[in-house]
Amino acid sequence: MTYAANRFCCDADSHILETRDWIANFADPAVRDKLPEMSLLKSGTKSFTLIHEAVVKQRERTALRTPAVDVVKGVKGWNAPGAFDAAERKAALDDLGFKRQLVFSTFSATQYLHHEDMEVRYGGIRAHNRAMSAFCADDPRLIAAGQMSLADPMRCVEEMSEGVRLGCGAFWIPGMPVGDKSPGHPDFDRVWQAFCDLNVPFLLHVGPNSPTKIAAYENNGRPRPKDITGAEGGENLRVRDFMLLSIGPQQFLTALVFDGVFERFPRLRGGVIELGAGWVPEYLRTLDLSQRIFKRTDPSVEALPLKASDYIRRAVKFTPFPGEDAGRLIREAGAELFMFSSDYPHPEGTDDPIGRFERTFNGISEDAKNKFYSENFQAMFASASAP
């Protein structure tokens, strides 16, 4: 029996663990030589030796035809079945039993996404989108999450069009201002229009978001703790980072609401992935409170014809962490907002995400559960074409 058993389940967050030359293999020659090395600072290892060893083990599994069994409880990271091999991911997905799975990269953006040379930035993005599409091409259950930078709106639209042609089904964008401009600035309207015209959602994900942490708070006279992976000097999440994860997406979404992006582009859809969701009910209440207070003095707020929270309800879905009380979120904010995710093969997804969510679902209807496990995921993709 599969892990999902009889539950129709769509997974809104899974990953590839890139090998050292993953981007280079898909980059144009003019860009390939300019790409810096992929950074492993936010991983549990700072050595490419571990990745090489994982590649060797994967080839051995393939040669021995080792089946992918109970992968959700098995080893995670580069050594997980399907972490970087497409055929093995197909077998892992068979074992998981998920009907669809949205797939993100993990570390490759460190090579190009914020590169000052726009040729390298957008050349790296195109290589990334080629690689993601190739990984997902042979299994219709997989949806490739392309990457995008809004820094050059014209290039952004060009690469989005090319990414869709390649097979990307959504685009992950940094949840932060673009230089000195809000993402709601009219200069980026052509990008939001492209999301609607191409019928693909935008995605915010943990990683490239607005910096919110004040470094002095970590100067507490104590040794620096291990990160979430257990690494002594790793640059992955620590407790203070975790507490601030929601600040960046709140700023970004607030800009899209009060700068009128969701009003100008009613078909725009998006997802906020691996950034938690416990903050969402109060965020929606605060949006509406802000609208009531400031519409008397701010013409842009006064001009919005809908309640501020209704723009979020219409356009955005969120993935709770497995440790959050998803039942409470559904009761407080509504069943239409939240989606299931496994984070496979990252360890943060835990060895039983379905079980952890189910334990919070006392009193939650089957209809609401169906929305959580599949229907909201499907709506995020399908409803971008709705009037």
Image: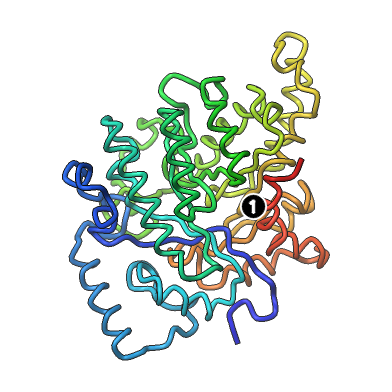
Q: Position of residue 65 (x, y in %)?
A: 36, 89
Direction from residue 137 to residue 303 in the image, left or right:
right
Above or below, 329 against 148 in this view is below
Q: Which residue corresponds to the image point at 83% horizontal and 64% vertical from the top-left?
A: 365
Furthest-top residue in this view: 297
Q: Which residue corresponds to the image point at 44% horizontal and 67% vertical from the top-left?
A: 345
The amino acid pointed to by label 1 is Phe
Furthest-bottom residue in this view: 64
Direction from residue 72 to residue 387 in the image, left or right:
right
Q: Nearer the viewer, residue 374 or 188?
A: 188
Above or below, 337 against 138 in this view is above
Q: Nearer the viewer, residue 324 or 155?
A: 155
Above or below, 129 against 288 in this view is below
Q: Position of residue 291 (x, y in %)?
A: 75, 22
Evaluate whether residue 262 shows in this view: yes
Evaluate whether residue 213 shows in this view: no
The image quadrant where one finds the N terminus is bottom right
Q: Check the image and tell me how it is coloured.
A: rainbow
Q: Position of residue 72 (x, y in %)?
A: 50, 75
Q: Secondary structure under badge 1? A: helix
Q: Count the marks.
A: 1
- Quarter of the image for residue 44 reads bottom left
Q: Nearer the viewer, residue 31 or 98?
A: 31
The image quadrant where one finds the C terminus is top right
Q: Which residue corresponds to the image point at 68% horizontal and 64% vertical from the top-left?
A: 373
Q: Which residue corresponds to the image point at 74% horizontal and 54% vertical from the top-left?
A: 328
Above or below, 161 against 377 in this view is above
| Residue under label 1 | 381
- Quarter of the image for residue 279 reads top right
Q: Position of residue 214 (x, y in %)?
A: 40, 30
